[in-house]
Amino acid sequence: MCGIVGILGKGPVAGQLIDALKRLEYRGYDSAGIATLDHGQLARRRAEGKLQALAARLEKEPLAGNIGIGHTRWATHGRPTENNAHPHATDRVAVVHNGIIENFRELRERLIAQGAKFGSETDTEVVAHLVTAEMKQGKSPADAVAATLKQLRGAFALAFLFAGEDDLMIGARKGSPLAIGYGKDEMFLGSDAIALAPFTDTISYLEDGDWVVLTRTSAAIRDEQGAKIERAIVKSTATAQMVDKGNHKHFMAKEIHEQPEVVGHTLAHYIDMIGEKVALPEELPFDWRAIKRLSISACGTAFYAGLVAKYWFERFAKMPVEIDIASEFRYRGAPLEAGDLMICISQSGETADTLATLRYAREHKQHILSVVNVSTSTIARESDVVMPTLAGPEIGVASTKAFTCQKARDVLYLGRGTSFPIALEGALKLKEISYIHAEGYAAGELKHGPIALIDENIPVIVIAPYDRVFEKTVSNMQEVAARGGKIILVTDPKGAKEATIESLVTLTLPDMASTVTPLVYALPVQMIAYHTAAAIGTDVDQPRNLAKSVTVE
Ligand code: F6R
């Protein structure tokens, strides 16, 4: 979370910084800021709210300077105010940060005792003061940063700009991603290659513990021990085009409608249509037959996708599967057998908890397969096998028309089997973009508690294709109807005919093989959330408090 960018440019960089930040807004959008060097002096502009507030500020109060850093924030420490917006600075150094400095309290107290004056509530500001304190002792900027990094605990990607140093920028990475972009007599830093796409496609990714001293013509990388090190320079395929909404009002609507195409594209990649067999990567570094137990770890929507995979692996491959949300998996000390397989699922490939589970599995000598949408991401790079989803960039952070639930305060989603994860996903999507409270339950669990919530004001959205558990789900709908609950049934023609209870609305999807229902039934639940949120008028693509890439715990 939080996006950072740095540019050692040939001309004024303020506009370029804003352009790069636009591409990073998916990482956070509660405030933003940039700092440049104007005649050797550090100058900053920061603004509360989305990036356009900063852009508007810069129109009125432009910033000169051919070198600069920028930040778009997702607040962790301190409210999203202008004072807490990055860059944080002293008269010697400005810094932007993605991550959390866990020991910031003790560092802050020590610095205050030494006379440092703090202007924000953030963890990040200690970094600017620490570097400044080291420089005041006579250290060069690079030595001051090296000494500072040794004092920090937590996760960070950092970019530093120094007063009086027009050809110097320093970046550091531990836990949060950071890429170097190579230009001709220009150099860049960014949270990802997409941010740098308008400027360069020549990228190298820092590894954990690396830090880099940049000039316009050089990049000197050191590892955590301070040894000089080379990191591969690769060509990025990130597109320079700003992804647009096409004819849609929101990115979310566009991304919902793109699914038939991108799911088809992804399936075509993994299925040999002519040979009618699955086409897995040829060189798997493990033998499926030797895997005794499969573990799956992910967060949020990716976790629900993993839950569907669990049903499939167990039903079709008869393989025992353990699945847990990554933030629990990583800390519960689960015993993992060497040689078994961990599957990590992540759209962004940067989710901190999922990455930590991957590393936990690695410590336990497991094979690691990741399913990611960003194939240059950290999770992809640290996996033994990567199976990319080919969905293209996802920008939107999460009723059929003006659905009845728009006025409801609470909504229940029910499903059985592979429709249970879809119920969970429906509830998550509705909560995150419409701010209506929603819960997803396994339909059979209803009578064990949630049924107490049912009355005539509660819409109950039932995901029930006509499958082997359909009749059981119909019984649960009876239980809802008997208590006055309003049922919205998502089913197929046979289900619509056989459901013996009256629903408020029935959404009838085409007949399909039961193996594909989780893919297809995800669409109506997304549409319900989308149209509800659009009707209420919430910010569908950038809902409050959220960020697309969650690189903190
Ligand atoms: C929900 C949503 C989040 C993400 C979660 C994991 O709509 O977007 O719940 O699914 O933060 O993110 P990735 O898949 O990037 O690891």
Image (cartoon, helix red, strand yellow):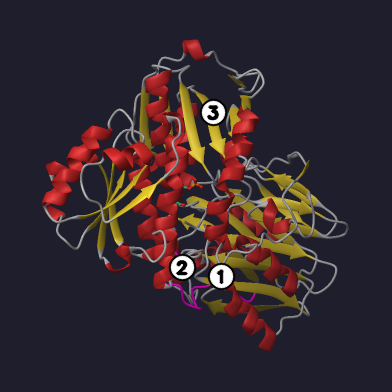
Q: Three-letter amino acid code at disc 2? A: Thr
- For numbered disc 1, what is the local secondary structure? loop
Q: Residues within 10 Å of mark 3 (few under 14, many from 20)?
A: many
Q: Position of residue 472 (x, y in %)?
A: 21, 34
Q: CA distance from mark 1 to mark 3?
A: 36 Å
Residue 113's disc is none
The answer to whether the residue labelled 3 contacts the one labelled 2, judged by CB atoms less than 8 Å apart, is: no
Q: Quadrant of residue 229?
A: top right
Q: Amino acid at mark 1?
A: His
State whether residue 227 appears in this view. Answer: yes
Residue of label 3: 369
Counting other residues with Cα less than 10 Å from the Cα at mark 1, is it few (<14), some (14-19), or many (20 or more)?
Answer: many
Q: Which residue is mark 1?
A: 86
**Disc 2: CA contacts within 10 A as few (<14), some (14-19) or many (>=20):** many
Sequence-wise, which precedes: disc 2 or disc 1? 1
Residue at the disc numbered 2: 122
Task: Find out if the beta carbon at label 1 lies less than 8 Å from the nearest ligand 1 atom.
Answer: no
Whether residue 77 is visible? no
Q: Position of residue 249 (x, y in %)?
A: 56, 67
Q: CA distance from mark 3 to mark 2?
A: 36 Å
Mark 3: secondary structure: strand
Mark 2 element type = loop
Looking at the image, residue 503 lies above or below residue 137: above
Q: Nearer the viewer, residue 412 or 78?
A: 412
Query: Which-is-in-front pick, marks 3 and 2?
Result: 3
Residue contact between numbered discs 2 and 1, judged by CB atoms under 8 Å: yes
In the displayed structure, 104 sits above or below 223; it is below
